[in-house]
Amino acid sequence: MQFSGLVLGLILFGSVVCRGDDDMNFSNQDVMPALDDYVKRLVEREVHSMMVEWRNSQRVQDAKIRALQSDLHQERLLRKELEARIDILEEQCKTTSEISAVRQSNVTTDTIYNAAGAEKLNRTDPLTSTTNVTTKRNGEGSKFRRLLIGQEPTPHNTVAFYAYMSHDLAAPSAGHVLVFDVIKTNVGSAYNHHDGIFTAPSTGSYVFSWTVTSWYHSYVYSELMVNSSSFGKLLTNSDEINDEHVASSVVAVALTQGDVVYVRVAGSKGTLASRGNILTSFTGWKLF
């Protein structure tokens, strides 16, 4: 109801008041209280109607605000999830790119090895050649191949490396490939100290071991990766002690030529240490 009702009521009562006292037999004393009461009721109704309308509008606005807040919360969660996925994809792309680069490098290395081997076969060297020797056993002749002093085994059959990190790492993120940049042994040149990746020069059985040190109030989860698969896990945990902690793990792996092996972080807090007498290291060798 609008104020038009109030206006109409005032007009009607005004007309009544304006009529003569003889016709209506009303006095101002009788009319004014009734008029005041009527006006009061009209105002109360109008105010009540406006309040109800305002409250309904407020409820609608509150519902819209809550819906927008919920949508904003969902958008933030989705954004965080997408950012996490992007970080994982970037790390995977980085690892894949590093692996491809190492494989390409090993293709070049294999070509050099093959060329060197062919050159050795085409020349005669009394210290590095294989000699057929005939001996008598029980009256029968037999032949066997004798390895002369100074003969070198083929590059692909002798593989061994050992390297360690020259510095600490502060809270390395999950997926971070550990780079053991100081090489002490690298027979066969299969380990790359620039990216921390070992590439199998030939098919066979290999043994790998890695050692990780966590500094005071720190921990490091690490894992040995063969291509893109986790092959071994290790926890080095000094989170609740005021000291460093050292842990190692060993795995045996059957590899195909071109497979890559590396150590990466699966989670950490604090500092991965490699200093002085506590070195974080990586080693491996071919069994057969």
Image (cartoon, rainbow, N blue to C red):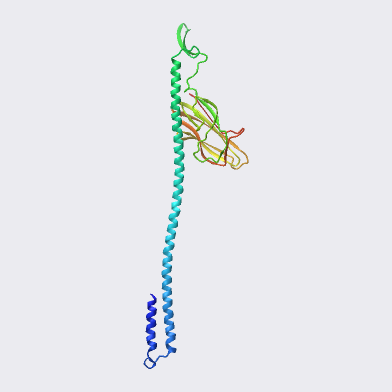
Query: Which quadrant holds the N terminus?
Result: bottom left
68 versus 166 height, above or below: below
Q: Nearer the viewer, residue 214 or 50?
A: 50
The spot of residue 224 in percent (x, y) is 50, 34
The spot of residue 44 in percent (x, y) is 43, 76
Q: Nearer the viewer, residue 3 or 44?
A: 3
Q: Residue at (52%, 37%) from the top-left corner?
A: 222
The spot of residue 51 in percent (x, y) is 43, 71
Q: Nearer the viewer, residue 241 or 148?
A: 148
Residue 36: name its quadrant. Answer: bottom left
The spot of residue 86 in percent (x, y) is 44, 43
101 versus 127 height, above or below: below
270 versus 248 height, above or below: below
Residue 219 visible? The answer is: yes
Residue 228 visible? The answer is: no
280 versus 135 height, above or below: below
Residue 27: name its quadrant. Answer: bottom left
- Give the residue furthest to the top: 139
Q: Residue at (43%, 73%) from the top-left corner?
A: 48
Q: How many marks?
A: 0
- Give the residue furthest to the bottom: 22
